[in-house]
Amino acid sequence: MTDSVVIIGAGQAGGQTALSLRQNGFEGTITLIGDEPYVPYERPPLSKSYLAGDVAEERMFMRPAAFYAEKHIVLMPRTTVARIDRAAKKVRLAGGTQLPYTELVLATGGRVRKMTCPGADLPGVHYLRNIDDVLGFRDRITAGLKLVIVGGGYIGLEVAAVAIKRGCRVTVLEMLPLVLNRVVAPEMSHFYTDVHRTAGVDLRTSTGVTAFEGDGKVERVRFGDAVIDADLVIVGIGIIPNVELAADAGLAVDNGIMVDECTRTADPDIFAAGDCSNHFNAIVGARLRLESVPNALAQGKAAALAILGRPEPVVEVPWFWSDQYDLKLQMTGLSRPGDQIIIRGSMAERKFSACYLREGVFVACQSVNMAKDFIQSKKLIADRATPDPAKLADPAIALRDL
């Protein structure tokens, strides 16, 4: 039969796979299945410029809707996959329709981790993962609104920055002792805590929510013996990878769908890419499940090449970014507790980098308004550089010269 690639998941990993297949000469059928009503789009602006109303939906689309028709890519929005039949090489949709495939790509992404405390299902308790989530509360982010944000990670702090600019009364509740606890050093966490408190955010750490309360809608948030009024709640406590289809089909799953460096699962005709995949990163020297746009795009490209019989391992330094107020946080590599931390630049002037050494090896860099450090740090990480700590601390010395 004619080669037919079915891609489950129309996010950036799935969209990039389809695009790369066509760019690299694939002439067979491509079917892109997504549960949202939109063409593949960029998620990062959702908690930043899109929430602020500065960017229209169309600006976030990876390609215009007409592009997919021109490239003969079959889009199936608002569609849910029920199961994968590996023996028959078919995908069964929730409505019963079956789609045959010669190759299958799982780009199923993740779903928000939800609160389970009393009142968690009250109207007015929102999550942020897709366009419709934002449309569900964006118009309410206006001056005077009492907004409570549960979670002091990227999403929570980015939403707080937007809401403060709009004149909201913002409270952030973080269960752990530090904000951004999983991803940055304490020095960076304290810096962002001070930034938000200075901007007017009531930021409380070591604070776990025990209940949402209200008569027909959320009106209060309870944590321990304390309670705070809330007109609106936004929860940002992480995502759960969507691995159920893979697991039900007998594929290996362990904090993501297990794949090799070229996105291949143990089934030679099934691949996985993006937030849902667990892969080995040769630079970091460990298996990872990365929730990042660069990884989704890189794995989408790799999946396409592997399908075409030209597999190329994904060898890339992990990197991420976050925009809050006038601060651009750009991160390369992955730090761990216990790493040596060296600050270069000035926290007071809001222009600095936190560099991480592990047994003398440069493993990560987190830069605030220091784009050159961000760019140049990638090569140091890839080369496993061992810079002189004294020179590393001197911002007058470019990272590339170390």
Image (tube, rainbow, N blue to C red):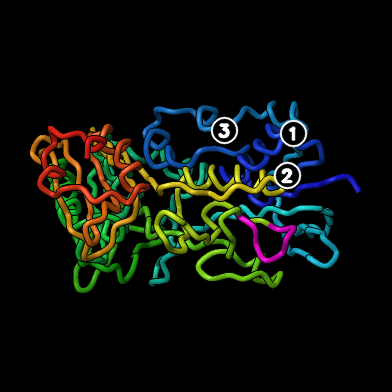
Q: Amino acid at mark 3?
A: Met
- Report x, y in % for residue 291: 45, 53
Which amino acid type is marked by label 1?
A: Gly
Visible residue check, residue 325: no
Q: Can you say which quadrant of the picture contains the C terminus? A: top left
User: Observer-nearest residue: 273 or 118?
Assistant: 273
**Residue in the picture at 10% in, 46% down:** 390
Q: Callout 2: helix, strand or loop?
A: loop
Q: Which class describes the residues within 10 Å of circle 1: few (<14), some (14-19), or many (20+)? A: few
Give the alpha-carbon distance from disc 1 to disc 2, as whole Å.
9 Å
Q: Which residue is mark 3?
A: 62
The reply, left or right, for residue 38 in relation to residue 156 is: right
Above or below, comparing residue 4 to residue 62 in the picture: below
Residue beneath disc 1: 25
Q: Earlier in the sequence, mark 1 or mark 2?
A: 1
Mark 3 or mark 2: which is in front? Answer: 2
